Image: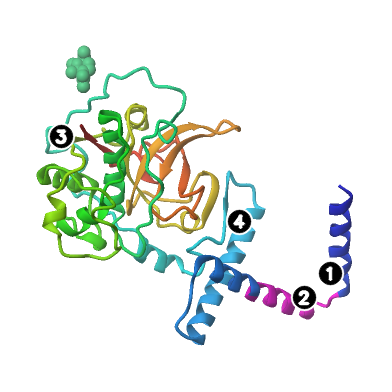
Amino acid sequence: MGTSKCLWLSVLVLSFCGSMVASRVLNEISMTERHEQWMAEHGRTYKDASEKQLRFEIFKHNVELIESFNAEDHKFKLGANRFADLTNEEFRAMYNGFKPSSTNNGIGTKNTFKYENFTAVPASMDWRTKGAVTPVKDQGQCGCCWAFSAVAAMEGVTKLSIGKLISLSEQEVVDCDVHGEDQGCNGGLMDDAFKFIIKNGGLTTETNYPYTATDGTCNTKKAASHSADIKGFEDVPANSEAALLKAVANQPISVAIDAGGFAFQLYSGGVFTGDCGTDLDHGVTAVGYGTDTDGTKYWLVKNSWGQSWGENGYIRMERDVDAKQGLCGIAMQASYPTA
Ligand SMILES: *[C@@H]1O[C@H](CO)[C@@H](O)[C@H](O)[C@H]1NC(C)=O
């Protein structure tokens, strides 16, 4: 108590003594230091001084937005994470590679939803605690979120069917699934990834066919070595968080979301409540759900932007919102593989 009061007092005295100009300069210096610190923390380097200056200006702008956002009353916080020196336009262009299906869920295809009549839905679920979720991965600067989303759902159903958690190869999907709308780092669809995996007869391990974050040539020898397989896939009935709940109660589920917003880019923790629309541009995996201490219901979502983003690589997104599409469209195009 005593110490913090003293600190507070000396800050007050300092700010009374300094002129506006001096504090402005101090502020710039500390922002420069913060940028340097952030660069060191995230291993970021720039090609020359002008690139550094440009990145500094964007960083500064973002930090100011973060601080004013965090000073307001929100259920989640923003932070200067790995995307803090990118404009929102750059972030969208680099990291979001989900291509929404032109045909809506289930329409035109014979779709069954095996959890339709499932009623024993627990109050909360966290598939990590059941050993059905591999550590958070990092897609790097490659728009193949769709492959990470599909593979995470497959890792989950594999654990539930054969009892083993095996980290599977996204790179195999990126390199070898060159059909339909799937275009490696340029985007794709989880359902098309499932179709590829079924046709391929399974997937090999992450270790055998490691991730490179680039579009490569399919290594057919490695792709022919299967460590896990799936029998089929099903779409969760669209625009129903109730249906999504039944599904996530049973296994990790691939979901598409609108992750293009500034708040999503710089999310650092808490229950995310938006802003976001329903322009689906990112594939992630719902690996649980629950209710926060203040009563806000959330989906537990595994992302593929490394462990430093969000809550150790995860985001909790508000659940049971007014819109039938769910927050950021999470209930619009959900699907899962069957074992
Ligand atoms: C759900 O129950 C209805 C009514 O009994 C039945 O017609 C339907 O096939 C069931 N759905 C599934 C996926 O088992």
- Residue 260 spot, x, y in % from top left: 40, 57
**Which three-letter amino acid code belongs to the residue tagged 3?**
Lys
Q: How crowded is mark 1: few (under 14 residues within 10 Å), some or many (20 or more)?
A: few
**Which three-letter amino acid code belongs to the residue tagged 4?**
Phe
Q: Is mark 1 on a helix, strand or loop?
A: helix
Marks 2/1: CA–CA distance: 8 Å
Marks 4/2: CA–CA distance: 22 Å
Say if residue 180 shows up in the picture: no
Question: Are the residues tagged 4 and 2 within 8 Å (C-beta)?
Answer: no
Q: Is residue 211 left or right of residue 83?
A: left
Q: Earlier in the sequence, mark 4 or mark 2?
A: 2
From the image, tell me which residue sits under label 2: 23
From the image, tell me which residue sits under label 1: 15
Residue 178 lies in magenta, yes or no?
A: no
Residue bounds of the magenta highlight: 18-32
Q: Which one is in front in this view, the residue at disc 4 or the one at disc 1?
A: 1
Q: What element carries label 2?
A: helix
The way the protein has been coloured in the rendering is rainbow
